[in-house]
Image (tube, rainbow, N blue to C red):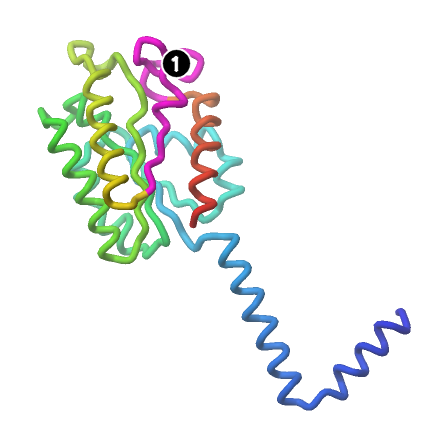
């Protein structure tokens, strides 16, 4: 044990008790403040199978970011997400919610719905979050120019239309827009072949791109 440490320790012992107590309280508060700055409380990922499968493709990413709560459910459309938004987001009281939704609506998984109606549902989720002091982040829909389970539907133009509406709303409402589309789209408005196995869902390489973009957003919390 060094003589320097012993001298410092003796000085602390000789400190008046109220000052010593204040010193320790201040240290604890400072540590908690720094820790809160570096690590968000909880952030929910709300989405469909693209979100749900993320944990399976990248378990290490979710281990490193233990505050992320994956609430993706395969096949879901925005009305279905709204139905469970209270239970899966609001009741958890997270610091933020990151919403990635719309491709299954475009695929008409639960029947026809217009792009405007899809957009309204996404905005409604964002509004509910804000009213409950939860910070929303709205994601672009990933590029797609075909739907293997609905080949009669041509999604490319609808995806672009929906993304533009979401982006404009985010700009007007001072909400973060997480643009996956621009980093993943190919020359035919498709999800680039090296990033997917079916044209809609990302593979490991696709999720790596998404993780890099998400990391940038997480730093803003």
Q: Nearer the viewer, residue 76 or 182?
A: 182
Q: In the image, 98: left or right of 106?
A: right
Q: Give the range drawn in magenta.
A: 176-201
Q: In the image, 183: left or right of 79?
A: right
Q: Which residue is drawn at 62% across and 83% down?
A: 21
Q: Which residue is drawn at 13% across and 28% down?
A: 110
Mark 1 nearby-residue class (10 Å; few <14, some 14–19, many ≥20): many
Task: Give x and y (percent) for residue 34.
Answer: 55, 60
Q: Is residue 62 above or below residue 95?
A: above
Q: In this view, does 73 lie above or below 174?
A: above
Q: In this view, does 193 lie above or below 180?
A: above
- Image quarter for residue 198? top left
Q: Residue at x 31, y 34 (%)?
A: 139
**Mark 1 — residue?**
192
Q: Quadrant of the N terminus?
A: bottom right
Q: Does the magenta stretch include residue 8?
A: no
Task: Give x and y (percent) for residue 55.
Answer: 43, 34
Q: Is mark 1 on a helix, strand or loop?
A: loop
């Amino acid at each position: 044990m060094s003589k320097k440490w012993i001298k410092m320790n003796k000085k602390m012992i000789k400190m008046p008790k109220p000052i010593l107590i204040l010193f320790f309280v201040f240290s604890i508060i400072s540590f908690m403040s720094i820790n809160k700055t570096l690590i968000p409380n909880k952030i929910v990922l709300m989405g469909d199978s693209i979100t749900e499968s993320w944990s399976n493709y990248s378990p290490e990413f979710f281990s490193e970011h233990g505050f992320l709560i994956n609430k993706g459910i395969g096949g879901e459309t925005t009305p279905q997400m709204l139905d469970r938004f209270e239970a899966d987001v609001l009741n958890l009281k997270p610091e933020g919610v990151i919403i990635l939704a719309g491709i299954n609506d475009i695929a008409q998984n639960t029947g026809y719905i217009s792009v405007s109606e899809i957009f309204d549902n996404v905005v409604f989720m964002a509004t509910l979050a804000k009213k409950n002091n939860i910070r929303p982040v709205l994601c672009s829909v990933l590029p797609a120019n075909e739907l293997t389970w609905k080949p009669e539907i041509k999604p490319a133009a609808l995806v672009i239309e929906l993304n533009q509406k979401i982006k404009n709303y985010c700009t007007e409402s001072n909400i973060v827009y997480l643009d996956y589309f621009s980093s993943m789209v190919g020359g035919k408005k498709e999800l680039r072949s090296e990033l997917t196995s079916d044209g809609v869902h990302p593979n490991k390489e696709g999720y790596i791109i998404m993780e890099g973009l998400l990391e940038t957003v997480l730093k803003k919390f």
